[in-house]
Amino acid sequence: MANAIAPPEEVLMGAWNRPRGEVLEGWHVDLELPVVHAALLNTSQPAWSHPSATAYIPTLTFPSEMPAQSSLDYPEMKELFSRNLSWSRAMWKKDPEFFPMHYPGQRPEFLWIGCSDARVPETTIMGCQPGEIFVHRNVANTYHPHDDSINSVMMIALFNFKVKHIVVTGHTNCVGCNQALNVSKLPAVPASTSLQRFLAPTATLARSLWTEDGPPTLDLLVEENVVQQVKNLLASDIIAEDWRRRGVDGVTIHGWVYHLEDGTIRDLNISQGPPGSVPGKKTKNGDFF
Ligand SMILES: [Zn+2]
């Protein structure tokens, strides 16, 4: 961590659109083109390198044969780079060790399975920092047993990082659940799009919740969908393998609902750990689980 030094603001700002390899005010621009400011390295203290230090040389030929553009040519995208720069600068100022400390690796204790909804960014709503939560988000926080994407995330979370908790979090006014609810109100037809196929089990769940009074409320479906995904996880081969490997120290599954109305997370009280596990009991490593 010898050179955990934030480049000065004028250097960061001046890095925009500067070519890799250029020395700028004593700082070496060593990052992907065009412009990622955070990879400015202090060449006087080359103790660590940045993950994006390898230059990207665009040699792709796109099917349209249109010339590639810089994202910075699009004002709304340039605004995102500007915000990122502000954030990076603030982080450097607040804690010069932050980025050097995070670059070598991660050790999250939690896996969040949540909805893709833009209003439910897990790290933000729980006041966490980058590095604290491993994440998979998809439409309506869904676990399908044969989904290689989510299974890959779970394998890394459990077998590499040995996360202690997996949280399935639904949220009120979920567009995905609402769509499944609407589908349940129509005659059953074969799903013909990716989204219809993905939501088909949730639509089936919605149908199962109909009573003589009519369809379930969206709030009920959101809760029951979380319960169902927790059940799906508990029945999965990967969780079984984790519990076999780690015994009582294996992962615990939780079900939550985030309320958009007031920004609070509410527990559904359906947490389930491996047989014999006790909440708060210390493991042999001295950690709580
Ligand atoms: Zn949603």
Image (tube, rainbow, N blue to C red):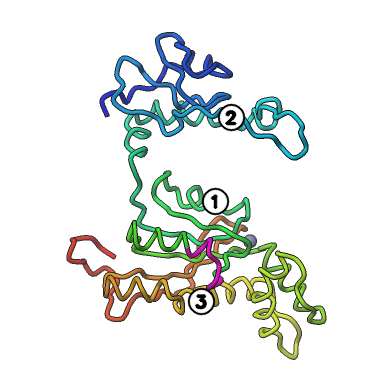
Side of 226 where 126 appears, left or right = left
Which residue corresponds to the image point at 34% horizontal and 44% vertical from the top-left? 105
Instruction: Check disc 2 and give the amino acid type.
Output: Phe
- Who is closer to the viewer here, 167 or 57? 57
- Who is closer to the viewer here, 178 or 111? 111
Discs 1/3, front = 3
The residue that mark 3 highlights is 232
Discs 1/2, front = 2
Which residue corresponds to the image point at 18% horizontal and 61% vertical from the top-left? 286
Q: Callout 3: few (<14), some (14-19), or many (20+) C-alpha neighbours within 10 Å? A: some
**What is the distance, in whole Å, between disc 3 and disc 2 at their CAs?**
39 Å
The residue that mark 2 highlights is 81
The quarter of the image that holds ligand 1 is bottom right
The residue that mark 1 highlights is 121
Residue 100 at what x, y percent from top left? Answer: 34, 33
Q: Which image quadrant is residue 62 in?
A: top right
**Tally of numbered tags:** 3
Instruction: Check disc 1 and give the amino acid type.
Output: Pro
Which region shows up in magenta? 144-151
Residue 257 at what x, y percent from top left? Answer: 54, 66
Q: Point out the tag, 1 or 2, that comes first from the N-terminus.
A: 2
Q: Are marks 1 and 2 in contact (CB under 8 Å)?
A: no
Instruction: Check disc 3 and give the amino acid type.
Output: Asn
Q: Is disc 2 placed on a helix, strand or loop?
A: helix
**What is the distance, in whole Å, between disc 1 and disc 3 at their CAs?**
23 Å
Above or below, 229 relative to 40? below
Q: Are marks 1 and 3 in contact (CB under 8 Å)?
A: no
Q: Callout 2: few (<14), some (14-19), or many (20+) C-alpha neighbours within 10 Å? A: some
In the rendered image, residue 27 lying in the magenta stretch gets the answer no
Q: Is disc 3 placed on a helix, strand or loop?
A: helix
